[in-house]
Amino acid sequence: MSTSWFRVIILILVCDAARAVVKLPGNKTIPAVIMFGDSIVDTGNNNYIETIFKVNYPPYGRDFSGGVPTGRFCNGKVPSDFLVEELGIKEFLPPYLDPSLDTDDLKTGVNFASGGAGFDPLTSELAKVISLSAQIDLFNEYVAKLKVAVGAETTSTILSNSLFVVVAGSNDITNTYFNNPIRRLHYDYSSYTDLLVDSASGFAQELYKLGARRIGVFGIPPIGCLPSQRTLQGGVERNCADNYNELAQLFNAKLSVELNSLNNRLPQARMVYLDVYNSLMEVILNPKKYGFSIANKGCCGTGTIEVAFLCKCPCPDVYNYVFWDSFHPTETTYRILVHQTVKKQISSFL
């Protein structure tokens, strides 16, 4: 059997497995998913604000339903979509700012994430996107709308049983810490990760005060191995940038400890650290195992630096690639990662 056919068969098997809907035990239910964060999970909120951090143009969305660019930083679906699909809630998680949202959308979950956002307030300010604190403001607006639609009691039930997910931190390291001398002047690795973890903890506690109980916070992926960081920081051989990965791992370790501490202090809280660092690193180091052949470049252009408006002339066979552009994984990679995460961690929320 040729290598190409073997790769195709492996890819089909992995994708088929990942399409399975997770069965919740007993009478447990997750009625909705509420998403906060950055471009990894933004499903189009940035389309409705004034920022250069938007991708509502081709080739983004090339493999999305109908081939339409929706503002997702990917060739197709992003983790927000796969999460609601895995849980059997709906096919896509709509952006909250979409004016066409209806009551069913509100009842089953919406997305407040904004590409370019971060835990460090300076990150969102520099990118001119919806900060995490502003995402909380939008969430409060959403709750008010939900109460009008279904009543206060049903709203409370939906919130306490829904899955709240936060995905942020990558932009803080890549766009703010290492590119902003002011941050490096005042913070070393330890103190900067403390700042990020304090922000993540405060955000989770704010969600808890507003009625959330099931809260998942993703760790930062191995951002030193993103194609863009390999190009900018990895030398002639484009190796992974160890300093970026070191900062990500330090944050992840502290975040995990902090979420455990919150669980011990807050009644009925089920706050879960979701590891994506090791999952994505495994795919990057062993791409053939997952049906890929290229893990150090993105599908767009040269694959070394292109993202957003620079992402042109995409590759003919995106299924060979772990990354879509120089910063974001492909739809297939996201599908694999979300399936693995949900399969491993869903019981922690129940």
Image (cartoon, rainbow, N blue to C red):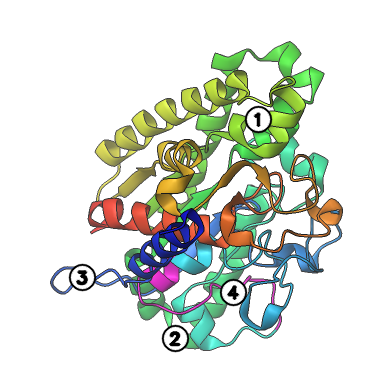
N-terminal of the two: label 1 or label 4?
4
Query: On residue 96, which mark appears?
Result: none
Q: Which residue is mark 1?
A: 173
Q: Amino acid at mark 3?
A: Lys
Q: Secondary structure at mark 2?
A: helix
62 drawn magenta: no
Give residue 228's position: percent from left, percent from top: 72, 37
| C-alpha distance separating marks 1 and 3 | 37 Å
Q: Amino acid at mark 2?
A: Val
Which SS type dominates the magenta stretch? Answer: loop
Q: Are marks 4 and 2 in contact (CB under 8 Å)?
A: no
Magenta-drawn segment: 83-99
Q: Which mark lies nearer to you, 4 or 2?
A: 4
N-terminal of the two: label 4 or label 2?
4
Give residue 54's position: percent from left, percent from top: 79, 59
N-terminal of the two: label 1 or label 3?
3
In this rendering, does residue 15 appear at all?
A: yes
| C-alpha distance separating marks 1 and 2 | 41 Å
Residue sitting farthest toward the front: 1
Q: Which residue is mark 4?
A: 94
| C-alpha distance separating marks 1 and 4 | 27 Å
